[in-house]
């Protein structure tokens, strides 16, 4: 009974801390803004809470962070779609991690990661090569146009491939290092697993779910939404993968040290 109460209090403390971190990062640390599209690192504490505490607590952290943040720092009218997105950021990472643990030893994680990256590279490259321009909402009332000249068509695939290779190499070296210095915590995801979790979570919420609700609310073009969010996605996953892995790793190392005292 005492241990259960202690665990519950510990989870509440971690959840409260992650809610505060998410609000501070979202509201006070500037992200990349392209009209109605935004790249922010505010979901990182929510993802971490999902991996540490599970999908239920992660969902609570996501909802609470969005509700408290919009209440304290309102920006326009309240829209429920971002709230659902924040909840998904707290639910999906834990569920994806559970799935990855089930397929351990059956499917190489690096192949899953490479496949996801290849899909993103192909999609963005095809849109740039096939279309001459894309018009997106620069603000809620005005639009802006990106013209895909010959340089866009040549260098976009090249740059994306280089970025994908850098991510693959970076995660691989993180994996090698993690295997040499294990933290003896089976609950801690590996670098490849963290990368896949971030990729699939951001792909589902930011690249697929986000463009759909923005099309409904702002009457914006779905293809344009998908393209812009995919560009932001490529930048976001690089940063999120490394930050989430090292913070999770530090957390479980601290837990391991505490348990061995």
Image (tube, rainbow, N blue to C red):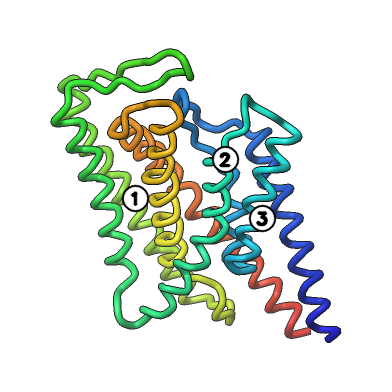
**Residue tagged by mark 2?**
80
Mark in the foreground, 1 or 2? 2
Circle 3/circle 1 CB separation < 8 Å: no
Counting from the top left corner in percent of width and height, residue 41 is at 56, 43
Q: Are marks 1 and 2 in contact (CB under 8 Å)?
A: no
The mark nearer the N terminus, 2 or 3, is 3
> Extreme top residue here?
142
Q: In which quarter of the image is residue 105?
A: bottom left
Q: Distance between the residues labelled 1 and 2?
A: 36 Å
Q: Is mark 1 on a helix, strand or loop?
A: helix
Task: Report the residue at 38% width, 39% height from top.
Answer: 212
In the rendered image, which quarter contains the N terminus?
Answer: bottom right
Residue tagged 1: 166
Q: Quadrant of residue 187?
A: bottom right
Above or below 110: residue 198: above
The residues bearing labels 2 and 3 have C-alpha atoms spaced at a distance of: 16 Å
> Which of the two marks, 3 or 1, is nearer to us in this view?
3
Is any atom of residue 249 visible in this view? no
40 on left or right of 227: right
| Residue at image location 50% in from the left, 71% down from the top | 189
Q: Where is residue 94 in the image (x, y as percent from the top left)?
A: 52, 67
Residue pictured at 30% horizontal, 65% vertical: 112
Residue depicted at x 43% and y 38%:
213
Viewer-nearest of labels 2 and 3?
Answer: 2
- The percent coordinates of residue 42 (x first, y second) are 60, 44
Give the image location of residue 88, x and y in percent: 52, 54
Side (left or right) of 85 relative to 133 = right
For marks 3 and 1, give the CA distance: 32 Å
Q: Going by the image, does 155 lie left or right of 212? A: left
Q: Which residue corresponds to mark 3?
A: 61
């Amino acid at each position: 009974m005492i241990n259960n109460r202690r665990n519950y209090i510990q989870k509440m403390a971690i959840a409260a801390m992650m809610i505060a971190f998410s609000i501070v990062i979202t509201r006070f640390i500037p992200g990349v803004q392209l009209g109605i599209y935004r790249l922010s690192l505010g979901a990182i504490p929510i993802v971490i809470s999902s991996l540490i505490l599970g999908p239920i607590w992660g969902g609570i952290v996501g909802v609470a962070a969005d509700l408290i943040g919009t209440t304290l720092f309102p920006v326009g009218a309240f829209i429920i779609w971002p709230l659902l997105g924040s909840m998904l950021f707290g639910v999906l990472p834990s569920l994806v991690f559970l799935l990855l643990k089930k397929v351990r030893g059956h499917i190489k994680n690096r192949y899953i990661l490479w496949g996801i990256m290849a899909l993103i590279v192909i999609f963005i490259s095809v849109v740039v090569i096939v279309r001459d321009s894309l018009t997106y909402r620069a603000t809620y009332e005005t639009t802006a146009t990106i013209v895909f000249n010959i340089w866009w068509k040549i260098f976009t695939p090249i740059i994306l491939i280089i970025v994908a290779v850098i991510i693959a190499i970076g995660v691989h070296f993180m994996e090698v290092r993690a295997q040499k210095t294990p933290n003896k915590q089976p609950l801690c995801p590996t670098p490849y697993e963290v990368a896949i979790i971030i990729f699939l979570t951001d792909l589902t919420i930011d690249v697929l779910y986000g463009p759909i609700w923005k099309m409904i609310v702002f009457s914006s073009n779905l293809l344009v939404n998908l393209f812009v969010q995919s560009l932001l996605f490529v930048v976001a996953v690089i940063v999120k993968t490394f930050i989430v892995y090292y913070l999770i790793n530090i957390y479980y190392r601290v837990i391991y040290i505490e348990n061995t005292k």
